Image (cartoon, coloured by chain):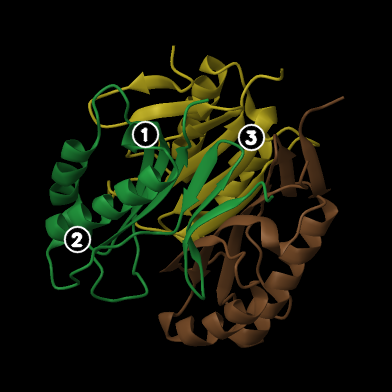
Chain colours: A yellow, B green, C brown
Amino acid sequence: MSDILRIDQNQRRSRGVVHNGFIFLTGQVGNDMGGDVRQQASEAFAKVDDMLSQAGSDKTRVMSVTIWLRDLEDYDAFNEVWDQWIVQGQSPARACAKAQLADPRARVELIVIAATAAA
Amino acid sequence: MSDILRIDQNQRRSRGVVHNGFIFLTGQVGNDMGGDVRQQASEAFAKVDDMLSQAGSDKTRVMSVTIWLRDLEDYDAFNEVWDQWIVQGQSPARACAKAQLADPRARVELIVIAATAAA
Amino acid sequence: MSDILRIDQNQRRSRGVVHNGFIFLTGQVGNDMGGDVRQQASEAFAKVDDMLSQAGSDKTRVMSVTIWLRDLEDYDAFNEVWDQWIVQGQSPARACAKAQLADPRARVELIVIAATAAA
């Protein structure tokens, strides 16, 4: 009945909210907070991919990614993971800044807006 | 005539901009900059609610909220206000980071994107 | 064939991604990293204008601008450039916070979402 679809909702937030051709994702971090930035970024991208697939979308349909890094020294290592994640010719817009996250062990958070399934 | 609607515009910005089923809000802070994070957050949410209602929307139609907190020590107290504001089953996506705001007394800023009125 | 249009793409990102009436831009910084905030902001706005024009849009159709400033002491000087850039009566929503950017010399970054060409 609703024109808004919510994915993976808990008591506090929806991991994804779909409306009118777009999906907005909750900021995604890694699973193992003891991991380095490569591991945390890989885990966060895997969660993004999973959320997108639940909306019939995928990483070739991402509009923008806002990247928060705890340490800018992680910038190059993060980009290695990024460069492997994106699909050449179908990359999103992005922005990256240093930001301290709610969990002090989190090294990276990804905030994604994507197009949902092609009509 | 225009396909873009602006709400509560001053010389510098529009508090809300509506287009194609979405409304983008200017970052909202509290009114009383002497208040604690609970008070500032409550005031900011009230302003968000008011902006959304002017676009025929409401808090059950929010896509995403980016939360900037001056002090991560305020995280739990902010979440108490958040948990009272959201409607269970209709929560938005969100992301939260520490950020120093233009007014150094501001403890929290909310950046909201929402769906406008259901068709 | 695609319902997603990408503008000015390099190996890592697209400067602009268009879908369903909106364009999302990569965070734009100035050209001369030795410049003060006025110069860097002017250069960043010029790049935003150029990206928007490639999507048949312009600054009167911007939905929101997220502004990251390296130094909040630059806030008033940035706003002087902002106030000259916007068109009165057609201003976007905005939010501004202090953030350290990937290039430590960058004083300001602009993250823009805009409506594309009017139907």
Q: Residue at x 21, y 39 (%)?
A: B85
Q: Secondary structure at mark 3?
A: strand
**Distance in Å between CA atoms under marks 1 and 3:** 19 Å
Q: Circle 1 is placed at which residue position?
A: B92
The image quarter containing residue B74 is bottom left
Callout in the foreground (3, 2): 2
* Quadrant occupied by the N terminus of chain C: top right
**Distance in Å between CA atoms under marks 3 and 2:** 34 Å
Q: Circle 2 is placed at which residue position?
A: B40
* Quadrant occupied by the C terminus of chain C: top right
* In the image, farthest residue toward the right: C1
Asked whether the residues under the numbered discs 1 and 2 touch, taking CB atoms below 8 Å apart as contact, a structural biologist would say no
Q: Residue at x 16, y 38 (%)?
A: B84
The image quarter containing residue A90 is top right
The image quarter containing residue A58 is top right
Mark before the other along the chain sequence, 1 or 2:
2
Q: Are marks 1 and 2 on the same chain?
A: yes
Q: Secondary structure at mark 2?
A: helix
Question: What amino acid type is highlighted by mark number 3?
Answer: Val
Q: Are marks 1 and 3 on the same chain?
A: no
Graded by Cα atoms within 10 Å as few (under 14), some (14 to 19) or many (20 or more), the crowding at tag 1 reads many
